Amino acid sequence: MSLFVESIPSQFGNASPSVSLERGNYRMRAPALRPPPLLLQEKGRETVIPNRKVVHHRINRTLVSLLMLLTVACLTCFGSAYYLYTTRWDIRIVSPYSTSNAVSEVVVSDMDIDDTDFSKKYLTYLPHSGFHNQRIALENALLLSHLLRRTLLVPPILLGNKPLRYVEYNTLFRHHELSSKEGLGHCPGIPVYISLPVECLHYFETSYVPWTWLVDLSTLSAHQSLFHRPNMSQAWLHARFSITSTDVYVLRDDTPYQFRFLDTLGDSSPPTDKYQEDVYITELAAIPERLLQIGTLFGTSRLRLKNSDNIAYLEMVRRKMIFANLDLVAAADSISQSLHYSYLGVHLRSGDGKFKTAIGTTVKAIWWNILHSMLNFSLAQICDVENKILGDMSACMNSDMKHIVTVNSNAFPPNSSWPLAYKGPCRWSRHREQKYDLLNTPIYVATDLQFPETHPEMLIMRQTFPCLFFLADFKKEITPLEKLVSPYDGVGLGQFVLPFVDGLVLGKAVNVVGTEGSTFSKFVKEVLWNNYTASVLD
């Protein structure tokens, strides 16, 4: 028994607020609830307990709306992705030969030749290097196929800043196979806002066009059979003509000047000639295979001809290589008209190899030729120009320059009778002294020299001739060329065709001087300029 007796209230008071002892048992009790503070109670308003069903309905409606929104967004994203995926490979349908660019009616499409005639024989070759090397190879191939009575499978023109350089046959053959654009027709149609796939990264650096896009071969097609290849793929040859490896005779070269073709039995190349082996055309005519595959055909002396008819045919072929594309001709005509058709033409090659190292000598030789051979300046007058205008007498004392004048005076006979019709603006101030009037003659310079208007090697030209013009001065005239596209691969051609415009403008000049050893200079003078001069005289 406890020594201390507690009252019942005190027992309950010391008990836990939630547990009390009654009759020997513990009884659980809920704690007392405190009323809310008076300040938080609103007078005359009863507390409303929200309906749980209403709250749940609101939450459900919100979730349904959110799910619907997410569903619509997902469907929209999926539809956009599907559209981009299905249209990214769409390509522009380019007319193979648009009216403005077609310059001849020759065999150019798959439906223009009977490929079921297995008795028909063909000839083709591997082009390489720049355009003019390709042109020379085509000229040789045209005559060779004509003499062999074989249909010439004409390779397309390869345009670009990185041409295929010559290598031995097997390697060059593989290069053509790898550079073929067969199977890449989707590349031109990829929108600009989509990254190019790996296979299209270098697609636009080069382009293929048929020769009929640039020159008129209709006259030649009346004398021989031509078929223009859309690419250099062997798979295309097999698919188009059913030509297998057993149907091909390959004349495989290991060096650029290994084979030379002769039209006369008993004739032979001189022992000192750069060509290593003579091949008689009559021997090639006996080859039974359907396709005669040759490597390189570049070289102006590749064909050693004695037969007068063959020589005449080759000369006709070369005369037909004039640029006849209507868009290019229109641009060149606009430039010539801007210069009032009264200007001299200069072709200055300086881009690579020996031309790059000799740029200073080349510019000085051209300067001499303009003064002496075109403007009919005497040696004394040239010395006066150097003394008064340039403040230099070195050229007059240079025996090499005198030799250049002697050599080239026959090639460019004096012609001072043509009027100075051009009265438009010049790049620099004109000479005011009457004896220097001819130095104000407009001169159009076609060159691969970067920034020729400020290049230090062009200083003598700038100081002597205030009316120098370059292609970049005629942006308005050449802007329409940006719309040109290749009929073979859909690549824009604006960046590749400017040298052709240069050539056409030079061809319309009163007289032309070029770079020694340049195939382009020779082509401009002997083909483009001679053709235009002859047409004017007619």
Image: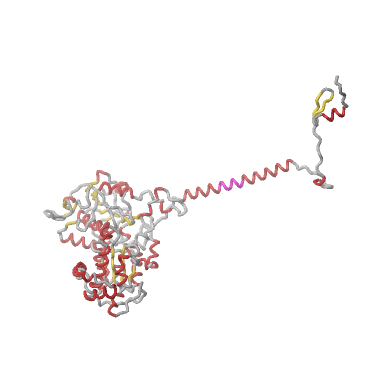
Whether residue 319 is visible to the viewer of this picture, yes or no, is: no
Quarter of the image containing the N terminus? Answer: top right
Residue 253 picture location, percent across and down: 22, 49
Question: Most extreme residue toward the top, as rendered?
Answer: 1
Q: Position of residue 49 (x, y in %)?
A: 77, 42
Picture layout, residue 75 above or below residue 332: above
Q: Position of residue 157 (x, y in %)?
A: 31, 56
Q: Is residue 153 above or below residue 429?
A: above
Q: How is the image coloured?
A: secondary structure
Seen in the image, is 246 located left or right of residue 67?
left
Q: Establish if 509 lies above or below 110.
A: below
Q: Residue at x 45, y 54 (%)?
A: 192
- Foreground residue among 179 and 488: 179
* Viewer-side residue, 264 vs 445: 445
Question: Can residue 143 be seen in the rendering of this structure?
Answer: yes
Q: Which residues are magenta?
A: 68-75
Query: In the displayed structure, does residue 231 sit left or right of residue 54?
Result: left
